[in-house]
Image (spheres, grey):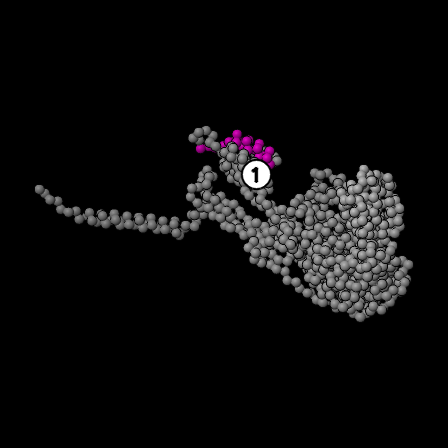
Amino acid sequence: MVISKPNKNIPVRVAIIIFICLCALTVLIYNLFKLQVVNYQSYLEKVLDNVQRETTVTGSRGNIYDRNGFVLATNYTVYRVFISPRDFLVPVFEGSDQKEPDREKVNLVADKLSELLDVDREMILERAAKVNRADETIKKNVEEETAKQILTFIRENDLSRQIHLEPAEKRYYPYGDLAAQVIGIVGTDGGLFGIEMQYDSYLRGSTDRYVTAKNGASLDMPYSYNDFLDAADGGNVYLTLDIKIQQALERQLRATYNDSMPLNRVTGIVMDPSDASVLAMATYPAFDLNDPYRLTDEYQAQLDALHLDPESKEYNEKFYELVYAMWRNKAVTELYEPGSTFKVITTSSALESGTVNLGTRFNCTGCYTVADREIHCHALSGHGNVDFSEALQQSCNPSMMEITARMGKDLFYDYFKAFGYTEKCGIDLPGEAGSVYHAKNGFGPVELAVYSFGQTFKVAAIQHLTSLCSVANGGYLLTPYIVSEIRDNAGSTLYEHESSVRRQVVSTETCRTIAGILEEGVSGDGGAKNAYVAGYRIAAKTGTSEVRDKVNPLTGAKDYRVGSTAAFAPYDDPRVAAVIIVDEPQCENVYGSVIAAPYIANLMAEILPQVDVERVYTAEEMAKLAIAVKDYTNLRAADAQSDILASGLAAEIVGNGDYVVSQLPKNGVSLSRENGKIILFTGDAKPEATVYVPNVVGMTLDVANKTLSGYGLNIVVQGANNGSGGAKVVDQSLPEGEIVPRGTAVTITLRYLDGTAN
């Protein structure tokens, strides 16, 4: 047997093979290390780019609340409906790599979505033809009810890969047009104006991504590369507005607009003078925040009057011009001459400086000469000899001009500046307009004279009311504000307003004196009698100014006017201050005392109880206080009659029955004690229309009362009636000649028309 010798090369070969394997393994480990560790993120992103679908996710926009927690702006869910054109592709024939859209499915989807979404079918077909796309929007802001119908359609036809719904949020304003110009709206990139714009950085939620893993068939993968990055919700903004006061202000603006039909809208503000917080701010006509591009009837009428082709460029330009005009917050962004309401500032400055005192007297002959220029008083025959209080209450222009002449240019201008008229007031709303006034080096004797009664300079309504509030609150000029705080959903404070005093302009003593004079001008025989409300002590000043930069095309003259009234109450401890401005009224009487003061009175009557101010009647007011009629039906006629007589009203029983079957006036009507009578019908008796209603418009209260009672009619009094006499009936609820039953109540509206033009 031959024994072979061991091969000495085998160990070497094994070693070489092992070495090679080790080297290969090392290279493999090295490459795996690079793939798994060094370049992990890069390759992961490449994989995710192919298997993931990314969706932008934005946190909810914050809500807007009034001061009592009522929601003024919020969100609700809507949907974006989109299709994935590439998921309509099918092989041209079985086993083929070439693909084409499934025409049957495309047509099915186009037919149904065009029907449900009210969109053009051809548009859907065009987007479905983009076969390399996975996301083609068909419609945004689809309501939930429609979305449910689409989901049913998807399920019934196995279209989960082809049709998709993405939830989103749409801004919703529960009160429609309430405070429209103040709140503002939201556009694609955030707030467009108002609070929505001013505090957009707080309101908007943060934007992040929602990433979902999909396989080649666009179906969810069994493993997860999903990642959801929480998007933070926006902050909730709490306004100083009080929804009830806001609604009251808007009712009065609507009323004065309908009565005076101004060309340039009406606006109003209610503030708390103690801290300059805005309780209400509005412009009328308003618009629907939920449909902000729809013109109001007033603006649409302006557009229609131009007779433009709706398809033309000119029509489109004019449309958007009117839309933007409709959105503007007149109280903040537009200027006007304050007129005689500025006399509050003139007299406060003069009294504080010691230029005049309560005993100072003036002689008004009807005009005042300055630098060879005659400037007239609204009372052309003059007010005669008046003291300081009467000059303010009667709104005497010559007296004001004499006051500023005594003050001199420098002193008056210093107070004009101190009251804030040369700077913006700083309200936290966008677009505050800066005042227009003469520089001091161009401020001559004529300017000094006409500034005394609020002419030839312009201010924003918010700026002027802020200055007037400094007289109401004891002399302190504050910065007005409308947002009190901003909180996140957890309740943490993101922002909180801190009230600041800009400066004290005049003393508290001066303010109290001026307030008392203004109140006497309302409750007495002053020019603001139409602002009177029984039981409340209101300080008010009316004003009428010229529009100097606009010519009336019908007359060729600059005869447009602005009528306004500013007030605060109670005069000795003000809780609210307000202004109403009527710009370019088209009624017969354009004076602020007629077209603004009555609505200030109605406003105060409504909002003072809401800020816990109770009525305190004088004995004279109690005697004139109307009595609310009770419901006496089904009571014994004798008992009802006794109760009526005990209340101070007269009673009459008609019929032979024992029980009251009907009555006139109905319950709830308020009758005067002087001649109010309730007629009780019993048995088969019933009211019969036998009385002709007379015309009492233009009569004084006494004459109207006697006339209506002489016809057997009751009278219900609304409007100014401070007891000074002279108020005239300007409206009656029932037209002349209408035939009504005896005992029917006729409501009359009283206003002072003489001696109030200022």
Relative image position of residue 609 (x, y in whole percent): 72, 55
Name the dominant secondary structure of the magenta segment: helix
Name the residue: 87% across, 47% down: 709
Residue 311 occupies quadrant? top right
Q: Could you say whether the residue bearing mark 1 is in a helix, strand or loop?
A: helix
Q: Which residue is mark 1?
A: 147
* Residue 177 among magenta residues: no
Relative image position of residue 11 (x, y in whole percent): 20, 49
Question: In front here: 81 or 7?
Answer: 81
Q: Quadrant of the C terminus?
A: bottom right
> How packed is label 1: few (under 14 Cα within 10 Å), some, or many (20 or more)?
many
Residue 631 visible, this angle:
yes
Residue 756 occupies quadrant? bottom right
* Residue 101 among magenta residues: yes
Name the residue: 70% across, 46% down: 287
Q: Quadrant of the N terminus?
A: top left
Give the amino acid at mark 1. Answer: Ala
Relative image position of residue 88 (x, y in whole percent): 50, 34
Describe residue 608's horizontal placement relative to residue 717 as left or right.
left
Q: Which residues are magenta?
A: 97-117
Question: In front here: 78 or 58?
Answer: 78
Residue 434 visible, this angle:
no
